[in-house]
Image (cartoon, helix red, strand yellow):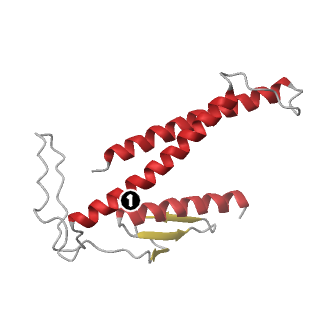
Protein backbone atom coordinates (compact mmCIF):
# COMPACT_ATOMS: atom_id res chain seq x y z
CA UNK A 1 0.00 0.00 0.00
CA UNK A 2 1.21 3.46 -0.69
CA UNK A 3 1.64 5.96 2.10
CA UNK A 4 -1.26 8.00 0.66
CA UNK A 5 -3.60 5.01 0.96
CA UNK A 6 -2.37 4.32 4.49
CA UNK A 7 -3.03 7.92 5.48
CA UNK A 8 -6.49 7.74 3.90
CA UNK A 9 -7.25 4.54 5.76
CA UNK A 10 -6.04 6.08 9.01
CA UNK A 11 -8.22 9.14 8.48
CA UNK A 12 -11.23 6.99 7.67
CA UNK A 13 -10.55 4.84 10.71
CA UNK A 14 -10.28 7.89 12.93
CA UNK A 15 -13.51 9.33 11.57
CA UNK A 16 -15.30 6.03 11.92
CA UNK A 17 -14.03 5.49 15.43
CA UNK A 18 -14.86 9.00 16.59
CA UNK A 19 -18.30 8.82 14.99
CA UNK A 20 -18.90 5.39 16.48
CA UNK A 21 -17.97 6.55 19.94
CA UNK A 22 -20.31 9.52 19.71
CA UNK A 23 -23.23 7.67 18.17
CA UNK A 24 -22.77 4.38 20.04
CA UNK A 25 -23.03 2.33 16.84
CA UNK A 26 -21.07 -0.85 16.09
CA UNK A 27 -18.11 -0.53 13.70
CA UNK A 28 -16.98 -3.28 11.37
CA UNK A 29 -13.55 -3.54 9.75
CA UNK A 30 -13.78 -4.96 6.25
CA UNK A 31 -10.89 -6.04 4.00
CA UNK A 32 -11.61 -6.53 0.29
CA UNK A 33 -9.85 -8.93 -2.10
CA UNK A 34 -7.16 -6.36 -2.91
CA UNK A 35 -6.34 -5.78 0.75
CA UNK A 36 -8.04 -2.39 1.05
CA UNK A 37 -9.49 -1.68 4.47
CA UNK A 38 -12.92 -0.16 4.94
CA UNK A 39 -14.74 0.72 8.15
CA UNK A 40 -18.52 0.57 8.14
CA UNK A 41 -21.50 0.26 10.44
CA UNK A 42 -23.06 -2.61 8.51
CA UNK A 43 -21.92 -6.21 8.71
CA UNK A 44 -20.91 -7.93 5.49
CA UNK A 45 -19.00 -11.04 4.54
CA UNK A 46 -15.33 -10.67 5.50
CA UNK A 47 -16.01 -7.98 8.11
CA UNK A 48 -15.08 -8.19 11.76
CA UNK A 49 -16.83 -6.33 14.56
CA UNK A 50 -14.41 -4.00 16.36
CA UNK A 51 -14.63 -3.87 20.14
CA UNK A 52 -14.81 -0.12 20.81
CA UNK A 53 -16.47 -0.32 24.16
CA UNK A 54 -19.90 -0.20 22.53
CA UNK A 55 -22.59 0.17 25.13
CA UNK A 56 -26.05 -0.91 24.13
CA UNK A 57 -28.86 1.45 25.19
CA UNK A 58 -30.41 0.53 28.53
CA UNK A 59 -33.94 -0.77 28.56
CA UNK A 60 -34.89 1.71 31.30
CA UNK A 61 -34.04 4.66 29.05
CA UNK A 62 -35.98 4.07 25.84
CA UNK A 63 -34.99 6.03 22.78
CA UNK A 64 -37.95 8.09 21.57
CA UNK A 65 -39.17 7.20 18.10
CA UNK A 66 -39.04 9.94 15.54
CA UNK A 67 -41.90 10.47 13.18
CA UNK A 68 -41.24 11.18 9.53
CA UNK A 69 -44.72 12.62 9.10
CA UNK A 70 -44.91 16.40 9.34
CA UNK A 71 -46.85 17.74 12.27
CA UNK A 72 -46.77 20.26 15.03
CA UNK A 73 -43.58 20.31 17.03
CA UNK A 74 -43.93 18.98 20.54
CA UNK A 75 -42.54 20.90 23.46
CA UNK A 76 -39.70 19.15 25.23
CA UNK A 77 -40.67 17.69 28.55
CA UNK A 78 -39.12 19.49 31.51
CA UNK A 79 -36.22 17.76 33.26
CA UNK A 80 -37.02 15.86 36.42
CA UNK A 81 -37.30 17.97 39.58
CA UNK A 82 -34.18 16.45 41.13
CA UNK A 83 -31.65 16.69 38.27
CA UNK A 84 -28.66 16.41 40.63
CA UNK A 85 -28.04 13.06 42.27
CA UNK A 86 -28.38 12.81 46.04
CA UNK A 87 -24.69 11.86 46.34
CA UNK A 88 -23.59 15.08 44.58
CA UNK A 89 -21.45 17.16 46.97
CA UNK A 90 -23.13 20.29 48.31
CA UNK A 91 -21.41 23.51 49.33
CA UNK A 92 -22.93 25.77 51.95
CA UNK A 93 -23.48 29.42 51.06
CA UNK A 94 -20.70 30.74 53.36
CA UNK A 95 -18.12 28.48 51.71
CA UNK A 96 -19.41 29.41 48.24
CA UNK A 97 -19.19 33.11 49.15
CA UNK A 98 -15.57 32.58 50.25
CA UNK A 99 -14.78 30.79 46.98
CA UNK A 100 -16.41 33.58 44.98
CA UNK A 101 -14.46 36.22 46.92
CA UNK A 102 -11.20 34.36 46.25
CA UNK A 103 -12.08 34.02 42.58
CA UNK A 104 -12.96 37.72 42.38
CA UNK A 105 -9.62 38.60 44.00
CA UNK A 106 -7.68 36.44 41.52
CA UNK A 107 -9.58 37.91 38.57
CA UNK A 108 -9.02 41.46 39.86
CA UNK A 109 -5.28 40.74 40.11
CA UNK A 110 -5.29 39.46 36.53
CA UNK A 111 -7.30 42.50 35.44
CA UNK A 112 -4.82 44.90 37.05
CA UNK A 113 -1.94 43.05 35.36
CA UNK A 114 -3.65 43.16 31.93
CA UNK A 115 -4.56 46.86 32.34
CA UNK A 116 -0.92 47.71 33.21
CA UNK A 117 0.27 45.65 30.24
CA UNK A 118 -2.21 47.47 27.98
CA UNK A 119 -1.06 50.88 29.23
CA UNK A 120 2.59 49.92 28.59
CA UNK A 121 1.77 48.60 25.10
CA UNK A 122 -0.13 51.76 24.18
CA UNK A 123 2.72 53.92 25.50
CA UNK A 124 5.26 51.98 23.38
CA UNK A 125 2.89 52.04 20.38
CA UNK A 126 2.92 55.88 20.49
CA UNK A 127 -0.36 56.31 18.53
CA UNK A 128 0.80 54.07 15.70
CA UNK A 129 4.27 55.51 15.36
CA UNK A 130 6.61 53.67 17.74
CA UNK A 131 10.29 54.51 17.71
CA UNK A 132 12.29 52.61 15.16
CA UNK A 133 14.81 50.20 16.55
CA UNK A 134 18.38 49.83 15.29
CA UNK A 135 17.72 46.51 13.57
CA UNK A 136 14.81 47.98 11.58
CA UNK A 137 16.68 49.66 8.74
CA UNK A 138 14.27 47.90 6.44
CA UNK A 139 10.87 49.63 6.65
CA UNK A 140 9.07 46.28 6.20
CA UNK A 141 10.54 45.04 9.49
CA UNK A 142 9.30 48.17 11.21
CA UNK A 143 5.81 47.67 9.73
CA UNK A 144 5.82 44.03 10.91
CA UNK A 145 6.63 45.12 14.44
CA UNK A 146 3.92 47.82 14.36
CA UNK A 147 1.37 45.25 13.12
CA UNK A 148 2.34 42.78 15.84
CA UNK A 149 2.06 45.58 18.41
CA UNK A 150 -1.46 46.36 17.12
CA UNK A 151 -2.36 42.67 17.41
CA UNK A 152 -0.98 42.49 20.95
CA UNK A 153 -2.90 45.61 21.97
CA UNK A 154 -6.09 44.20 20.49
CA UNK A 155 -5.56 40.85 22.25
CA UNK A 156 -4.90 42.57 25.57
CA UNK A 157 -8.00 44.75 25.18
CA UNK A 158 -10.08 41.60 24.59
CA UNK A 159 -8.51 40.04 27.71
CA UNK A 160 -9.44 43.10 29.76
CA UNK A 161 -13.02 42.99 28.46
CA UNK A 162 -13.30 39.27 29.17
CA UNK A 163 -11.96 39.67 32.70
CA UNK A 164 -14.42 42.50 33.39
CA UNK A 165 -17.30 40.35 32.10
CA UNK A 166 -16.15 37.43 34.23
CA UNK A 167 -15.89 39.60 37.34
CA UNK A 168 -19.39 40.93 36.61
CA UNK A 169 -20.73 37.37 36.43
CA UNK A 170 -19.57 36.49 39.95
CA UNK A 171 -22.45 36.58 42.40
The image shows residue 18, relative to residue 170, as above or below, that is below
**What x and y, as percent, mark residue 45?**
46, 72
* Residue at (60, 63) in percent of width and height: 10
Q: Quick one: 76 or 79, which is closer to the camera?
A: 79
Occupied quadrant, residue 60:
bottom left
* Residue 87, x across and y down, in percent: 21, 77
With respect to residue 144, does 21 lie above or below? below
Element at label 1? helix
Residue 152: image location, x then y, percent: 62, 37
Residue 20 in picture, x, y percent from top left:
41, 64
Is 5 or 163 nearer to us in this picture? 163
Q: Which residue is mark 1?
A: 102
Mark 1: few/some/many CA within 10 Å (<14, 14-19, 20+): few
User: How many numbered discs, if any?
Assistant: 1
Residue 94 to residue 105: above or below: below
Which quarter of the image is occupied by the N terminus?
A: bottom right
The residue that appears at 31% across and 50% down in the rendered structure is: 170
> Is 89 drawn above or below residue 16 in the view shown?
below
The residue positioned 25% from the left and 71% from the top of the image is 57
Rendering quarter of residue 3: bottom right
Q: Is residue 111 left or right of residue 77?
A: right
In this orientation, which residue lies closer to the viewer: 70 or 115?
115
Compared across the picture, whether 19 is left or right of 94 comes to right
Whether residue 41 appears in this view of the structure is no
Camera sees residue 48 = yes
Amino acid sequence: MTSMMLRGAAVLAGLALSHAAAAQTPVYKCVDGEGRIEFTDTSRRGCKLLDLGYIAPRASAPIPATSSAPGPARAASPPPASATPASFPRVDSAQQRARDDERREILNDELRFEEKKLADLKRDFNNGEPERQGNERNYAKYQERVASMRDEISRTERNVEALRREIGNIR
